Amino acid sequence: MSTSSKDGGVGARFRLDGKVIAITGGGGFLGPRHAEAIAEAGGVPVLLDIRRAAAEAAAAAISKTGAEALGLGCDITDPAAVRAALATVLARYGRIDGLVNNAANDPKVDTDGAVQNSSRLETFPLALWNADLAVGLTGAFVCAQAFGGEMARRRSGVILNIASDLAVIAPDQRLYRQPGLAPEAQPVKPVTYSVFKAGLLGLNRYLATYWAEAGVRVNALSPGGVHNGQDDAFVARLADLIPLGRMARADEYKAAVVFLLSDASSYMTGANLVMDGGRSTW
């Protein structure tokens, strides 16, 4: 005889009923998908984004489904702004149960297969290095310090760090090569993305052990590339590097997000769940 979630079985462990969970980069591409997953599992997503209008729009879309959601403007590199966002959440809901460190500067592949706003290692601007690490790594630290610190004080909570397959493997720069360009002019995936995503895994392990006795679990999810209107030639080249033979759909990480935020992963901390279609196994 199967046990239903109403009886406290396996299904109930995947629920997030009443849990208030903040998501950085909530107005971006995957941030709203993470928020949808939380709402679908009964939780309350709080979408944080430096673009306040984008965060509010994403939250409003979720609210139209009948679920509770909140969008807030927040510069996650500013500790005062992050503390203010936390204060707003606590004033409204009286609790914080989770944090998804999702925000990142990620140059996208344009319609010609090149990388927008990229530069090669030899000429990569220090200002851009600092800006990318400020969002992708320092921002995660600042948010963990505030939101995680509050959860540790309450002795309950979960942090989910969104890393990348490029946190565990190097980018294959052949994907970005363009015919007719000299080697020194070829576009590349910038160095910062690999560095701050790998650094996020280091932060993940540190926080997991630091707050283990405080009842705060910390895990990472390393997704592979998500199809988002990239050039067909680029998509085909990338698919050849993936055992499953395709890029991910935007909604394919939602169940993993719920798993890592819920009691379904209650004996899991400090781990990195790699979900890349098998790319990193080759």
Image (tube, helix red, strand yellow):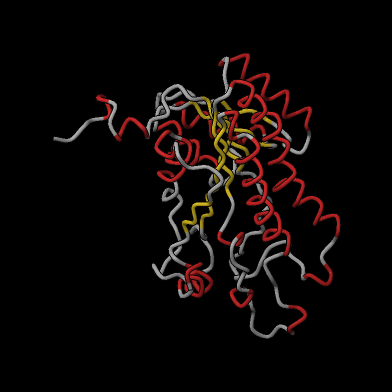
Q: Nearer the viewer, residue 159 or 117?
A: 159
Q: Quadrant of the N terminus?
A: top left
For the point 61% across and 36% down, the residue is 54
- Residue at x 52%, y 25% (from the top left corner): 20
Image coordinates for residue 116, horizontal then vertical, percent:
69, 62
Residue occupying the point 63% across, 14% down: 91
61 over 248 or under it: above or below: above
Please provide percent x and percent y for residue 114. Answer: 64, 70
Quadrant location of residue 41? top left
Question: In the image, what residue occupies the spot 60% across and 34% down?
Answer: 55
Q: Nearer the viewer, residue 52 or 278?
A: 278
**Left or right relative to 15: residue 190:** right
Spot occupied by residue 132 in the image (x, y as percentages of width and height): 75, 52
* Residue 243 versus residue 66 in the image, above or below: below
Q: Residue lying farthest left?
A: 1
Residue 281 screen position, x and y as percent = 47, 69
Badge count: 0
Q: Which of 133/226 is in front?
A: 133
Using residue 186 as the reference point, say whether residue 91 is left or right of it.
Answer: left
